[in-house]
Amino acid sequence: MPTPTGALLGASYQIPEEEGVVVDARKRETYPALIRRLSHQSVVKHFDAYADIDWDAPEMQIDPEDSRWELSDDDMLGRTAWYKSQPQAVRARIGLHIMANFMKIGLDFENVLKRGLLEFAMTLPNGAPEFRYAYHEVIEEAQHSLMFQEFVNRTGFPLKGIAWWQRIGSRQVVRFGRTFPELFFVFVLAGEDPIDHVQRSALRSGRPIHPLLKRIMQIHVTEEARHLCFARHYLREHAKDLGAVKRFVLSRRAPFILAIMAQMMMRPSPGIVRTYGIPRAAIEEAYTRNPEHRRRTLEALSKVRDLLVEVGVVTPSAERLWRFLRIWPEAVPA
Ligand SMILES: [Fe+2]
Ligand SMILES: [Fe+2]
């Protein structure tokens, strides 16, 4: 029987605050003290992919036709007439397939993230508090990837993760960990914020969630609260010192990164669309022409967008790019 290292089980679980664990200490806390507190939290509240998840318990087993995998009316695809017209077993299978694909993409993202963090750590001098925290984060992300891959394996879906061109592009992101950490941490937030937003919304919804998925999301949300806190505060601390050239590059690349990541994290992959023959009309109804989907995407990106505005990276000319990419709030039809 696994031995939980954190108090996450049962009704006592509470979704942690997003800005770290002791929010009211933030105002009087210096940046190095914050990083040291996050490191300490990683020691006293961390999880192991195999010790803290009882993968072989009967209630944790995955039945692809279990109704708890079905997309609810709250889901953009789940509320379409096409989805509702599918047999129950197909509806459940589609829901599980989308979730497993989400985890596969998530673990590919975490692979890039870990490599970038190691590059970042190599640039740090002795005594830098970020060094220790970067290693805690690498260790936690490695545990997340183990649990995501185990989940994917147990679904049996032959998922491939990110596309070949994204793998090639990811090498540049890894390099940014060393050469341009501010841009690297925008990438981190662009991936982590939407995942975190989706998982928090699911946990808060009160809908029946399969216990295995619920356990994975609880663990992930708890540790991601720290990762997001670190990335945000790193940007707050360092973006103000950027030179003109790097500031310009950051302002132009950030909206593209956010637009691409949001698309990957909030819509079914082309492979899933093909597998189930989801008609173009259903995709348009659910996503392309759906103001509610736009609204949710913008909501998922709102924290990182506000942060980039705060640190002065969204200049008036950069804002036009955000509008062009349809990730600026005023672009939403009334
Ligand atoms: Fe993670
Ligand atoms: Fe993370």
Image (cartoon, rainbow, N blue to C red):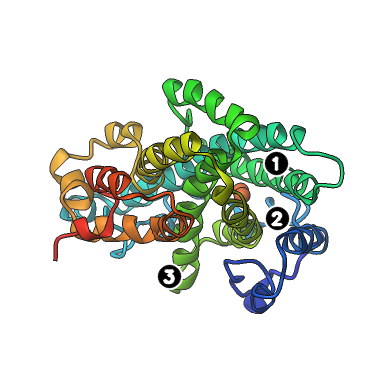
Mark 1 Cα shell of 10 Å, populated few (<14), some (14-19), many (≥20): some
Position of 43 with respect to 195 (left or right) is right
Q: Where is residue 93 in the image (x, y as percent from the top left)?
A: 38, 46
Q: Position of residue 64 (x, y in %)?
A: 45, 47
The disc labelled 1 sits on which kind of residue?
A: Ala
Vertical position of residue 6 compared to residue 270: above or below: below
Residue furthest to the front in view is: 244
Mark 2 or mark 1, which is nearer the start of the sequence? 2
CA–CA distance in space, label 3 to label 1: 29 Å
Residue at 72 percent of width and 70 percent of height = 29
Residue at 82 percent of width and 59 percent of height = 43
Quadrant for the N terminus in the image: bottom right
**Which type of secondary structure does the marked residue at label 1 adopt?**
helix
> Pointer 2 and pointer 3: residues touching (CB < 8 Å)?
no
The residue wearing badge 1 is 142
Quadrant for the C terminus in the image: bottom left
Mark 1 or mark 3, which is nearer the start of the sequence? 1
The disc labelled 2 sits on which kind of residue?
A: Ile
> Pointer 3 and pointer 1: residues touching (CB < 8 Å)?
no
Tell me if residue 155 can be seen.
no
The residue wearing badge 2 is 53
Residue at 59 percent of width and 71 percent of height = 17
The residue wearing badge 3 is 207
Vertical position of residue 135 compared to residue 219: above or below: above
Q: Where is residue 81 in the image (x, y as percent from the top left)?
A: 16, 55
Mark 2 Cα shell of 10 Å, populated few (<14), some (14-19), many (≥20): many
